[in-house]
Image (cartoon, helix red, strand yellow):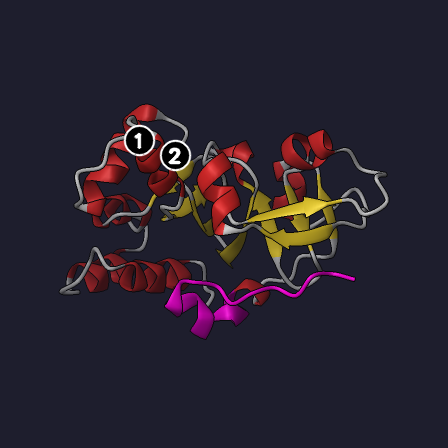
């Protein structure tokens, strides 16, 4: 039996969990980005979703969810590296490794022009430095085990561009480019007093995706 999911830690997501259900993805394993875009999984695999513990994340890094095959018919390598996304029937979990944002899976928050997801640090050192500056605590991507464990728990909002398949760290600056073809939304966004607030950024990302 599928293990019961625990409440998501981000308060806004708790109040808007239906966001992950607004764009239905049929149950199954998506083996390419094209399959995700077409909402057409090519494999029907019975996988169990596991909410990873804080200890596991701090020790091994990666995102909040993983999948396992109860009967061993699907290898760990396939689950960890080959599947692009897996839908439980009501929520799509993307394989963040495919987008260079750590290992394991994270649920999408919104789907449309962009796939919106909250996940760990970027795999790219240059992007990590930019991300860590936004935390305001002076952390760096190197250091001892304690610092590494703390870094493993950081989560950032990403917009995955369906054209380039690249994950863009969502900041007020990035929103200028993301909204450049929707001047109406861009004007409204720039009128906001808290443009760096994730709640505000997500609001406009969902409007852009026609997901509100």
Number of callouts in the render? 2
Where does label 2 land, which residue? 122
Residue occupying the point 35% across, 60% down: 202
Inspect the magenta stretch and tell me whether residue 4 lies in it: yes
Residue 146, position as x, y percentages in the image: 33, 37
Label annotation for residue 127: 1
Query: Alpha-carbon neighbours of circle 1 within 10 Å: few (<14), some, or many (≥20)?
Result: few
Relative placement, left or right, of 118 versus 106 is left
Disc 1 secondary structure class = helix
Query: Alpha-carbon neighbours of circle 2 within 10 Å: few (<14), some, or many (≥20)?
Result: many
In the depicted structure, whether residue 155 falls above or below residue 72: below
Residue 175, position as x, y percentages in the image: 27, 49
Disc 2 secondary structure class = loop
Q: Earlier in the sequence, mark 1 or mark 2?
A: 2
Residue 172, position as x, y percentages in the image: 22, 50
- Decide which of 55, 118 is in the foreground and name it: 55
- Decide which of 36, 53 is in the foreground and name it: 53
Q: CA distance from mark 1 to mark 2?
A: 6 Å
Whether label 1 touches label 2, CB < 8 Å: yes
Quarter placement of the C terminus: bottom left
Report which quarter residue 20 is drawn in: bottom right
Inspect the magenta stretch and tell me whether residue 205 lies in it: no
Q: Is residue 212 visible?
A: no
Residue range highlighted in magenta: 1-19
Relative placement, left or right, of 20 versus 204 is right
Residue 16, position as x, y percentages in the image: 46, 71
- Decide which of 26, 207 is in the foreground and name it: 26
Q: Is residue 173 visible?
A: yes
In the depicted structure, whether residue 88 falls above or below residue 69: below
Residue occupying the point 68% across, 42% down: 35
- Decide which of 39, 200 is in the foreground and name it: 200
In the depicted structure, whether residue 79 falls above or below residue 26: above
């Amino acid at each position: 039996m599928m293990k019961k999911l625990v409440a998501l830690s981000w308060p806004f997501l708790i109040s808007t969990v239906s966001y992950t259900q607004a764009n239905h993805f049929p149950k199954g394993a998506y083996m390419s980005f094209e399959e995700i875009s077409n909402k057409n999984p090519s494999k029907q695999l019975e996988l169990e979703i596991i909410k990873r513990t804080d200890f596991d994340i701090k020790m091994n890094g990666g995102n909040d969810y993983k999948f396992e095959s109860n009967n061993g018919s699907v290898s760990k390598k396939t689950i960890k590296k080959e599947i692009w996304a897996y839908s439980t029937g009501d929520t799509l979990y993307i394989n963040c490794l495919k987008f260079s944002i750590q290992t394991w899976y994270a649920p999408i928050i919104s789907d449309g022009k962009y796939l919106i997801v909250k996940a760990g640090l970027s795999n790219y050192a240059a992007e990590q430095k930019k991300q860590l500056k936004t935390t305001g605590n002076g952390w760096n991507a190197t250091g001892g085990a304690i610092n590494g464990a703390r870094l493993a728990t950081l989560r950032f909002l990403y917009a995955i561009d369906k054209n380039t398949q690249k994950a863009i760290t969502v900041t007020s600056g990035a929103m200028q480019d993301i909204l450049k073809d929707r001047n109406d939304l861009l004007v409204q966004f720039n009128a906001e007093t808290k443009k760096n607030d994730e709640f505000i950024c997500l609001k406009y990302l969902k409007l852009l995706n026609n997901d509100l």
